[in-house]
Structures are given as C-alpha cells and as structure tokens.
Image (cartoon, rainbow, N blue to C red):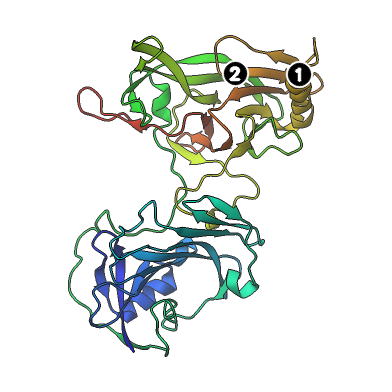
Amino acid sequence: MVVAVGYAQAWDLEAREAWRPMSAGEARERDATGLPYVVVYREPGREAPLEVRLVSWRDHYVGLWVYDAQGRRTYDLDMRLLDDPARLLRRYTVAWNYTGPVMAEFDPKCPRVIVDLFPDGRGRRTEEPRGYSTSPTHRDDEQWMVRPAFGEWPLLSAQVHGFTEPPVFEVAEVAEGGHGDAPATCWRPPRPAQPGPIGALFRPGVRVTDGYHPEQTVVEPRRVGTLRVPSGLLAVAGPDNVDEEPAITVPVPPGEYVLDEARVRFSYHCEWRDREVTTTGPTAVRLLVDETPAATWEMALGPDDDPRLFIEEQIAGFDTDGATGCFADAAAWEPLVALYERGLIQGEPDLDGYEDIDDGSMFMQRTWDEASGGELMAFATTGDGTYPVWIGRCDAGEVVAVVVLVEGMPELLPERDGTTADA
C-alpha cells in the first residue's frame, strides 16, 4: 500500500486540509528549530486523510489525529516531550466510536474513551457519555513511545485502517497556496486556560455575561476588610483541606492589604414572585497589593504543576470540597487553618483568633495568629472543584493583585458606543 506524505505549516480544522504546503527539507528545518509544522498521510483515491501529525517541539508537543472515510476524527493522541529527549509521554487520548456512517463528528452521544496519563503513572480512564471512570494500568511501552527521528515516523494508525503490510511512503508534490496569515481555523498547540477580562470585573459600568444571564453590569467593588501578610508569602487555598499544605503561594511585600469582591448587577424573572427582579451578586475576590492597574495576568502554578503537561484550557489552582477558598499568610498556615477548623467545623464557642463574619459579603470567616500577626480570610465559591488563581502584574513585572473568580470567566459585552472594555 502506497501512502503519500505531505508537509505543511498548519492544518485547517474546518476545511480538513493543509495550509501552506512545504517541502520535506523545509519541514526538516522547522523540526530542528522547534517551529510548528504538520505531516499529512493520505491514501490515493481517498478524500479524507488517514492521519495528521502536528508537531511543535518548542511547546513539547506532538499530536496525532486519525480520520475515518467520512472525514471524522476517530482518535486524538496528545504526546509530550519531557526530560528524556528519546521518548514521548502519551499524555492524553480520546477515541470516538461512531455508531454509524451518518453520526456527526464529535456528536455528544457518540461513545468515546478518554485516557489522561501523567509521568508518575497516575491516570484516569473515562467512558463517555456514561461518565464511568477507572484508574488505568499501563505498561511502560503503552505509556511512553520512542521518539522517531524526522522522516522515520511510522503510520501509527495503520492497524486502525486495516493495513496488513507496512505502507510504502512517497513524499507528495508541494502545491502552491497558503499565502498571507493562517486562517483562524488552523490548528495551534494546546494552551492552558487564559485569564479573560479579569481587570474589567472591578471597573463599574462594564457590561459582561456569564452565559446564563444575557447582560450584567459591573458595580463598585465591595471592600470587605484587610489581610495581614507579615511573612511576605501569600497562600491561596481551600481551608477545608486542613491536612494539606497551601496549593498556591505568591510572594508579596510584607504588609496589610485590602480585600474586595467584584460584583455585578443583573435582572431576571423570579418565578416565586412572578415578576422581573434586580439583584447584585459577586463574581471575584481580590487581594489588592498595589493601586497600579495590572498590565498582564497569569495563572499561578503550584509546586507540582508542570506547564509542559497542560492540555487545552486546563487549569491549575486550589481544590475545595466545601465550596470555600481563602487568602492567608503562608508562614502561619498551620495555626490559621487549625483555628478555622476549631471555629467552623468543631464549633468551639468564644474562640480567640476566630471570627464568623455575617455582613452580607461572601467572606465568611477570619482567623488570626497572635504569635506571627498573620491572618486568614475565607470566602465562598459557587461549588466544589478546582479554582485557578490569577496574578496581576504591572508593566515592571511586580505583583499588583491576586484574584480568584468564584463564578467562572465571564465574557465582555460591547459598550453602549460599540467599543469593548479593556480586559
């Protein structure tokens, strides 16, 4: 069986075709320098490709997409190049099992298996749409793949396509096309969750939507208190995980900082009152380190977070099983969390160093350590799970704010004059 091998700068996901074809020599140069490129494998007479390999060594990434005769993606393999240059981690795979030739690509009802693997052997195998999950067991050769040299990659989907003999590869002729900028529909390497319009949530008058309420208007942030961080190391974590170290720590100058909550005003139809009502709700909490506006935002990482392993839109952050997060002085973490547990969970009356706040804000508890002067302020989230922590920096790179979104990332709406607020 002859298989044509073509190289290109990108792959257009919508058109299912290569963008800006290139020669094997040009692709080899991009491979050596780490620049992105794609390899397309085609069988003569078949419209859909057999598989597409997407390479970006500078992003530690190689992807493999397998297509069926209908042009639907049936297999997605995400591989990562880590510390060993000779092998690749099979980081993330999705296999779709379409129930018939007319089922649409990525139909939510399509049975699929998702395998999530990490270098230390941890992982999860999930069957969708059932939602059934197990911890997979993989041999070393199933978890890792030897990294082939350029031009020596096998057709990894040969068995899927029913090939009984190794294919004979022929380099396809380079066609003209793909001038100018790549279409927005072209593939790019996976990237973690992006910050979104965080700064806009603290600017009154900005219009946003959470996807459920079509329009919300940012109102004046509510100041809820201050937090003392004498050690100069801020912890952001779930205080309900009392036996764990704080998930995220952020160096800040020692001092006392304002805590405020971002709020939006919106209207909705209240079934109980059978009329339209207007209310105000929180969207984020912020520790304000400096009044200088943030020029950039970045997701804070914990000590075990490796950006090379992040799949598309993945988040890092703190976990909570009690719909609660907190800001705290990291140096006094143990006594502060111990007071939180004694006051909230054990309900000790008149406990020194603990205060239950009931002023209408999302902040619920405060604890303080007399020995160090460090404090903890706990706030409500909208549920359990993982919450990312966003660090705002000024143009000079200094930390000016630390923010946790409690309602997810909103979307900016155009201003009344048609412009869009800065994020």
Q: Which residue is mark 2?
A: 363
Residue 85 seen by the camera: no
Instruction: Pick the quarter of the image with the C terminus.
Output: top left
Say which element carries label 1.
helix
Task: Name the residue nearer the viewer: 60 or 64.
Answer: 64
Image coordinates of residue 408 in percent, x first then y, are 46, 33
Image coordinates of residue 117 in percent, x first then y, are 58, 60
Measured along the vertical axis of the image, is residue 67 above or below residue 114?
A: below
Q: Quadrant of residue 172?
A: bottom left
Measured along the vertical axis of the image, is residue 187 above or below residue 304?
A: below
Residue at the image point whose x is 61% and y is 56% from the top: 134
State the residue lying farthest toward the front.
100
Image coordinates of residue 294 in percent, x first then y, are 45, 31
CA gap, disc 1 and disc 2:
15 Å
Horizontal arrangement in the rendering, residue 357 relative to residue 180 (left or right): right
Measured along the vertical axis of the image, is residue 300 above or below residue 107?
A: above
Task: Name the residue nearer the viewer: 370 or 346.
Answer: 346
Horizontal arrangement in the rendering, residue 282 relative to residue 253 (left or right): left
Kindly report which numbered mark, 1 or 2, lies closer to the viewer in this rendering.
1
- Count of numbered badges drawn on the protein: 2
Residue at the image point whose x is 42% and y is 76% from the top: 160
Residue at the image point whose x is 54% and y is 33% from the top: 399
Residue 6 seen by the camera: yes
Q: Which residue is mark 1?
A: 343
Type of residue at label 2? Phe
